[in-house]
Image (cartoon, rainbow, N blue to C red):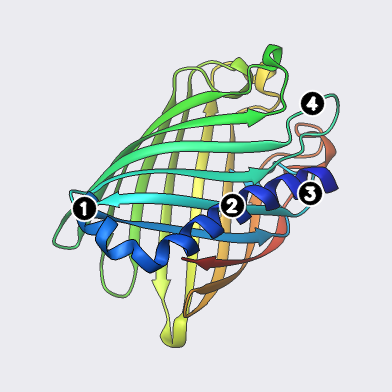
Amino acid sequence: MKKNLLKAAVITGILSAALTAHADDSKPLSELLNGKFTGSVGGVSDYKFRGISQTSEAPAIQGNIDFVHNSGVKVGVWGSNVDFGGTSDASLETDIYTSYTHSFNKLTTEAGLIYFAYQGAKSINNYNYTEVYGSAGYDFGMVEVTASLNYSPDFFAASGVAYYPKFYIKAPLPKGFAVDVSVGRQYIDNNSRYGVPDYTDWSVGVSYAIEDFTIKVQYVGTNLNNTQCALDACEGKGLVSISKAF
């Protein structure tokens, strides 16, 4: 686990250093490329993906770097340490993605493609997979509501076609605070291959932003029991995270 955290720390450190080194002359480069670079680095007490722990309930170090074109096109990469336990040798997850975002007054739409890669995993495990997604969000002022749908033609561990619809609500509060609630449903064609039946996950969180830092406390859970999901990876749990944007 320490090796996994160290690898993740090195990756996020490189991302951070690249962004920092770029800061002094970012304006000419941004003008040349007609866009801007953004990124973040941070840590979380347990990396939960759609309600299931990806680190055997251990902490994770995570970071990303994106380039956002003025047209609304974005390309980027995100990374985190992972630990699936058992005989899995996967130690790092790297997500490479591109998307297009467009706003119509208070309505924001987005469509994108994500490739999930797991470094260290044996090829026979077929962990790597691709998803396409679309979302639409509306800002009502007091709350922001977003509905999204992710689709994979061959999901994690070669478990076949998968869908993940999700609803997300965020309410900004005074003095940098915000609350958010989400509910999603994971549908998987080959449940035995994936390891769990179709399930619902949810989260409730409170965040606090000050300058470039964001601190968040949330509760994440699923409707899976310990018989359906081994090693308590799917049980409800409180999480704490902190991140810094660049």
Tag 4: amino acid: Ser
Task: Point out which mark residue 97 bears.
Answer: none
Q: Position of residue 5 (x, y in %)?
A: 76, 49
Q: Which residue is mark 1?
A: 32
Q: Is residue 6 above or below residue 216?
A: above
**Percent coordinates x, y for residue 221 in the rendering:** 66, 51
| Mark nearer the viewer, 2 or 4 | 2
| Dot 3 alpha-carbon crowd within 10 angstroms: few under 14, some 14 to 19, many 20 or more | many
- Residue 91 at x, y percent in the picture: 73, 36
Query: 141 above or below 48?
Result: below
Q: Specify the quadrant that holds the N terminus.
A: top right
Which kind of residue does numbered mark 3 sit on? Glu
* CA separation in Å, label 2 and label 1: 23 Å
- Local packing at callout 2 (Cα closer than 10 Å; few below 14, some 14-19, many 20+) is few
Q: Which residue is mark 2?
A: 14
Q: Nearer the viewer, mark 2 or mark 3?
A: 2
Give coordinates of residue 48: x percent, y percent. Answer: 65, 48
Mark 4 or mark 1: which comes first in sequence?
1
On the question of residue 172 being in view, the answer is: yes
Name the kind of residue labelled 2 in the image: Ile
Mark 1–mark 3 Cα distance, whole angstroms, equals: 44 Å
Work out whether residue 1 can be spotted: no
Disc number for residue 57? 3
Between the C-alphas of marks 4 and 1, the distance is 44 Å
